Amino acid sequence: MTSILVRDTSLVISGITVPPTKAELVGARARVLGTIHEVDGTTELVFALTQSRWGGSVLPLPAGEYRIETDADLDSVTLAETNATVMRVQVAGGVVTISAPIDPVYRSADGQGSLERRYTASGEKLENAVFFESFYGRNASCNPLALDREIARRLPNVTRYWSVVDLSVDVPGGAIAVVEGSPEWWRARAASRLLIVNDWLRRAFARRPGQKVLQTWHGTPLKRLALHRPGFDPRRMVAVIRESRRWDGLLAQNTYAAKILKAAYRFRGALWTEGYPRNDVLVAGNRNEVRDILGIEPTERVLLYAPTWRDDRTEMVDFLDLDALAHAADAVVLVRGHSRTLLPGRDTAGPRVIDVTSFPDTSRLILAADELITDYSSVMFDFSVTGKPMSFLVPDIEHYRGALRGFYFDLVAHAPGPVVSSQSDLHMALANPERETLFAERYATWRKRFNSRDDGRASERVVARLIDQNWLATD
């Protein structure tokens, strides 16, 4: 009879009578090949529950459901939930469920309510520490990551906490990962002198005397935001204004974005227009270092396809046959879904297609790519820092502009590259040798408007302000 147990950070299935020819643990964003061992005349399958992803540290697998795919004859077994410091594992009916390592006492609504009340009433003394959160803890990236690196360089005595959904998230060296909803997460949030986030603050927020919040946001907007969105519910309007009152500072990439963000959130605090720290790497970074991680040769043509999310669907749009695109362009295609499609989506695959939705940092993907294909995503305003070609695939532009979000300016009239509505037109645009010449004037105007402060030193300027405003202490 087969038995299943978790040994250290591995899932072990023992007592298999006929050795399998295949064994894999398959999840939406990760998969692990099993190793097969002979033990006392029977077979043992071992699946590592940790792995190094994208050249990073060896960490637990992302939380979620994984299927045991094997031709071995496994009895129907159930494993009681394990109690572990790095992950919690439960097995039932061939499905392995991995979750964040939060004590069951605190996983219920009552448990979280208790921690929230403790946080709200806390008289925790502020530490010279920063609490970082990027895209609701799904990765350590974007402007918060760039600022972490500069703070670590300039102020090595500052403690750096990173909010993460689970311990599969690779945080920067020297930083402390705190799992969302854990007692450590609530304590770090209460004790940090400065919070640096790139989206809304979740859950209860009780500001301590002297505590500051820097909202870096996560992109220059083309699509309408917050109070500017069509058909916005009055209750959500109240929530938007309440949220913006939590921010002491708001970072904008350019003056265009600064005006929109201020109005869309009715923001009344300090508005800093310093360029985007996340784009510093685009000025001086080494693209071949990223290509090495992705397994791409320096001479390969690389297309980055990065569409935004849609309010009326949970997964990434499926407007492209990615294999056909790779073949037509004779290129490697990197597919980058929006952060909101990371959890509900699944990786796509193909002979020359690499799904990089779970890659921790979009800026390094921009560095590695030769060209961008997008739609309405703010990645267009970051990619233009490089001056490399862009194309815009927008088959649903009328629906998106008219029913879903609306735009702040006419993309078709101002785009610094071809705007197309079909895959065949995209193939033609990518093959046009005159494309860059045709859009050179538009591209120059675009960069002057949106990238004048993206000079590779935005992180330095922002951290200098944090010190000057005494939001961070130097000792």
Image (tube, rainbow, N blue to C red):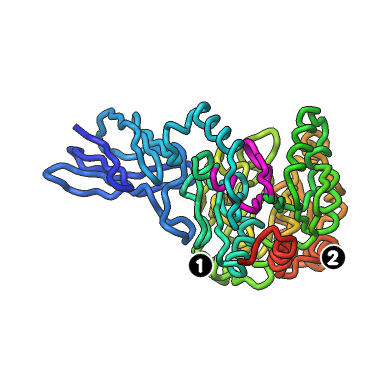
Dot 2, crowdedness within 10 Å: few (<14), some or many (≥20)? few
The boundaries of the magenta stretch are 187-209
Residue pictured at 12% horizontal, 43% vertical: 41
Q: How many marks?
A: 2
- The image's mark for residue 292 is 1
Q: Quadrant of residue 328?
A: bottom right
- State the SS at label 2: helix
Towards the viewer: 320 or 220: 220
Q: Position of residue 422 (x, y in %)?
A: 72, 46
Q: Earlier in the sequence, mark 2 or mark 1?
A: 1
Residue 259, image x, y percentages: 86, 51
Residue that extends furthest to the left in the rendered view of this protein:
40
Left or right: 173, with 264 as reference point: left
Tags 2 and 1 touching, CB below 8 Å = no
Residue 212 pos. (x, y %):
69, 51
The answer to whether residue 318 is seen in the rendering is yes
Amino acid found under the numbered disc labelled 2:
Lys
Amino acid type of the residue tagged 1 in the rendering: Asp
For this view, does 156 lie left or right of residue 451?
left
SS at mark 1? Answer: helix
| Relative horizontal placement of residue 164, taking residue 204 as reference (left or right) | left
Q: Is residue 55 left or right of residue 22?
A: right
| Residue at image mark 2 | 448
Residue in front for this viewpoint, 178 or 280: 178
